Amino acid sequence: MEVVDSVLLSRLDALDEAREIAAQYFAAVDVEGLDLVRVKVRSRLRHGTANTVVAIAGATGSGKSSIVNRLAGSNLSEASVRRPTTSATHAVIWGAADAGPLLDWLEISRRHQIEMQHADFDGLVVLDLPDHDSTAVEHRLEVDRLVELVDVVVWVTDPQKYADAALHHGYIQPLATHAGMLRFVLNQIDRLGDGGSAVAADLARLLDDDGIPNAEIIAVSALTGDGFEQLEAVLARAIAERTAMLERVEVDLADAAAGFGRSGAMRSAGEAEERLVAGLSEAAGSAEAARVAANHHKRQGSLAMGWPFTRFLRRLARKPLADLPGPGRHSAAEPRADLALRDYAEDVAGDAEAPWPGALRSAVSQHRGALLDDLRRSVGREALAAGARSRWWSAVAWLQRVFAGAAVVGLGWLIVVAVLGGFFQLATDPLLPPTPGADWIPLPSALLLGGVLLGLLFGLLMRVPLAVASRRRGRRAQKAIEHQVRGHATTRVIEPVMQVVRDREALEELCRSVGS
């Protein structure tokens, strides 16, 4: 095997890498087409550039076999004229280079090795293809197969069929990107006389419409030999340069990569990410969660610092945590999250064409369930954390216990005095000492009234600093929720989307490497 240019091999390696990325996003049928090109190119490269394979193709009666016979200098294709038509392709080989493995790959069994009559034809392999307009399906399939594999295709036509739609629509137009491997022969010019130039010009016009401008038309007569010097020179030039195969491979690679390259531009994700985070924060109910967190903190503070004998009333009231927002707790939360995800995918997709918008939608939704769970947990966790005890609560709670204790002692003392005086008719004056500094009120009454009044008053006074602290806790909870929403959005949504964006950029770069 000859050494193939390292740049070409690197392009083929780039196509392999592109295939791995494309398989994740494109339809299987598209990737299968890419695989066919990869296999074909590698197989052809293994056979090197020692032989140049030229296919002679044309319609029924165009004179393909006659041209092959004249090039070979013998009547090699005479038997094919007399035998029943088949789909077998006829190969003629010039030179000493072993074309056997190459023809085995091309699945050509009918082979003729001839003596060198043209020194410039060393390494030439000419294939006489079946008629491309044959009514036999196997003939057309054979033509289609070999046109995809050979290095050069010489399309032979005649004055009657040069404008045939089957030729132009079925073969030339699909191969327009491979114009460098196409040659065009107008046969039977001996029948046209002075009109040959006009027919050749009209054929050139049709080829220009097919996407092959400035096509060279070789006018020949297989009967008289006119124009064959020009045809032989064209073939000799392709052989001498030894680049026909490489040019075909390069075009095949470029065509294969073209279908996976740039197709519209994606937008920068910066602003889209901010809108996504804002939308998910709204879905999580960060603002409402802040209010719930503040109320939860206030309730917990009231329970901790309020007068012990009125706490049960607060416990009977509706708990703020029952109003927690977010997915799973509010009917509008999940639709809001879905809207934010959809808008983000559309923002990033921009003008990109399929399959990228669909890939981005899949990326934003693949972790949807986990994202909603994360949002719900974040809201609940921060709302609960807002109710954590502050250090100053303990001092107030201790004082409230002192006040409550004083009230209990005073009440108990008065009950004892009432029982002794009322039931047992005992003298109770000694049991009701005056309050120091306020001898107008007995000490047990002072303890009861003072404990009740001070406890209730102190509880009311603590509402002011508690309200301030609760609002601060609410704002802190909202910031914490939004921070966590950003983290969850990055992990569950933005990173998968950025992976799609990176894959697309890598695929485009690889396709540029393949096609350059």
Image: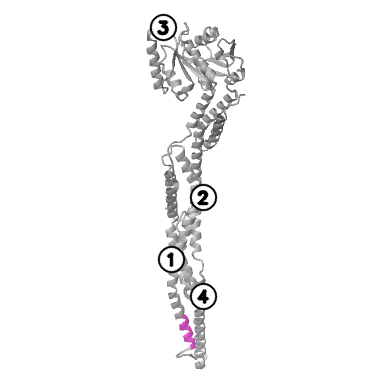
Q: Position of residue 84 (x, y in %)?
A: 53, 9
Mark pair 4, 1: CA separation: 21 Å
- Which numbered disc flags the more N-terminal residue, 4 or 1? 4
Mark pair 3, 4: CA separation: 118 Å
Q: Mark 3 or mark 2: which is in front? A: 3
Viewer-proximal residue among 46 and 278: 46
Q: Which residue is mark 2?
A: 491
Q: Which mark is residue 331?
A: none
Give, as a single range, the part of the protein colored magenta.
443-452
> Is residue 463 on the magenta stretch?
no
Q: Which mark is residue 471?
A: 1
Q: Main secondary structure of the magenta part?
A: helix
Viewer-proximal residue among 255 and 476: 255
Q: Which residue is mark 3?
A: 191
Q: Which residue is mark 4?
A: 395
Residue 231 falls left or right of residue 49: left
For badge 1, the amino acid type reads Arg
Tell me the SS state at disc 4. Answer: helix
Mark pair 2, 4: CA separation: 43 Å
Mark pair 2, 1: CA separation: 30 Å
